[in-house]
Amino acid sequence: MNPQTERTWAEVRPETIVSNMRAIRASLPTGTKYLGVVKADAYGHGAVPVARALEENGADYLAVACIAEAVELREAGLRLPILILGNTPPADVPLLLRYAITQTVADSDYAAAFSAAATAAGGTLRVHIKVDTGMSRLGFLCDEANLGESVDAIAQICALPGLQAEGIFTHFAVSDEPDADSVAYTQRQIARFNAVIDALARRGIRFALRHCAATGGTLFYADHALDMVRPGLLLYGYGDTTGKLGLRPGMTLKSRISAVKHYPAGTRISYGGTYTTQRETRMGVIPIGYADGLHRVLSNKAQFWTKDGFAPQRGRICMDMCMIDLTELLGVGVGDEVEIFGEHASLDTLAQQAGTIPYELLCAVSPRVPRIYL
């Protein structure tokens, strides 16, 4: 047996992720560029293997959250342009220049500091300007009251020495929500973004890359894709809307039954005794717990897939293991695989049971869980 699969492991299929990218691209207007979001270790799938698969199969850009993630990709030999979506200290501009990394600019002070640092280093830093059209996070505030002031500021940034303003982008807040208020809100964000672009164009300022569509925008507002899209979770095949494009999960999280025990009715299971057997019970122990990324809040809520069907989880999830009820699954025993989520056990269902979103459960899969690339 492979030592990596004796306990708990994640099977990752880069070819499935590439297939998802192709399906997404096919749904977009011809010529739309594709940015692969590989921040947070590619949502737990492994940034370098995923980025390499995307690069080899026609992606145009990559995006990460911070400079450490970008440098990791460059040192692994990735050559695609890489956009850092978050802030970077101006002191790291020489590193950005050395590795040809594109930096987001979200305010005038940072822009001035980036300009000074790039000029001092004798280089030109490629940047994308972030516009806040309603996410209320990073970016130049471009609601109706602040549009003029922000356009002035962006125009000044585009004239700074040492900076090449390649792109401009915004982020939708509720583009994946179908209710009328959310649709109206997203349409308002689109209108604000277009107003910024048009105002700058009237001053002779144009950008090679204008982008606003992440997962929700790519799915539901593809007619506003502009020059490039940057779907995140969608690329990896999760979310309750993936069926629209026939996407499949890129990762399957598995464990293996390490013990089977029999308990009489009335036996309390695990810490706190939160579950009590109602009958004679055949209980399996699997070596996965919250230190592996299986949230404790899922205790007594989740069910995991076995070769003979789903087994309900019983009692508190521990740090390194948890218990599943095998009373009705007599053919399942020690050594058999258990799928926590993947092709058979929906990550979306697991996220609903945990009261969270699929992103969090993917990112929670801990580094001690080996990734096996199939």
Image (cartoon, rainbow, N blue to C red):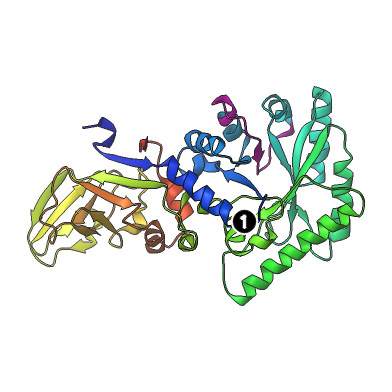
Q: Nearer the viewer, residue 279 or 258?
A: 258
Residue at 49 percent of width and 59 percent of height: 245
Q: From the viewer's perspective, tell me whether residue 67 is left or right of residue 287.
A: right
Q: Nearer the viewer, residue 100 or 61?
A: 61
Q: From the viewer's perspective, tell me whether residue 110 is left or right of residue 280.
A: right
Membership of 193 in magenta stretch: no
Q: Quadrant of residue 305?
A: bottom left
Where residue 165 appears, as percent x and y from the top left, is: 80, 41
Magenta segment, principal secondary structure? loop
Residue at 58 percent of width and 40 percent of height: 58
Q: Which residues are magenta?
A: 73-90
With respect to residue 142, does 112 lie above or below? above
With respect to residue 215, does 90 lie above or below? above
Residue at the spot of label 1: 28
With respect to residue 199, does 333 lie above or below? above
Membership of 78 in magenta stretch: yes
Where residue 20 appears, as percent x and y from the top left, is: 49, 50
Where residue 314 appears, as percent x and y from the top left, is: 23, 58
- Whether residue 297 is visible to the viewer of this picture, yes or no, is yes
| Residue sitting at the far right | 203
| The C terminus sits in image quarter | top left
- The amino acid marked with disc number 1 is Leu
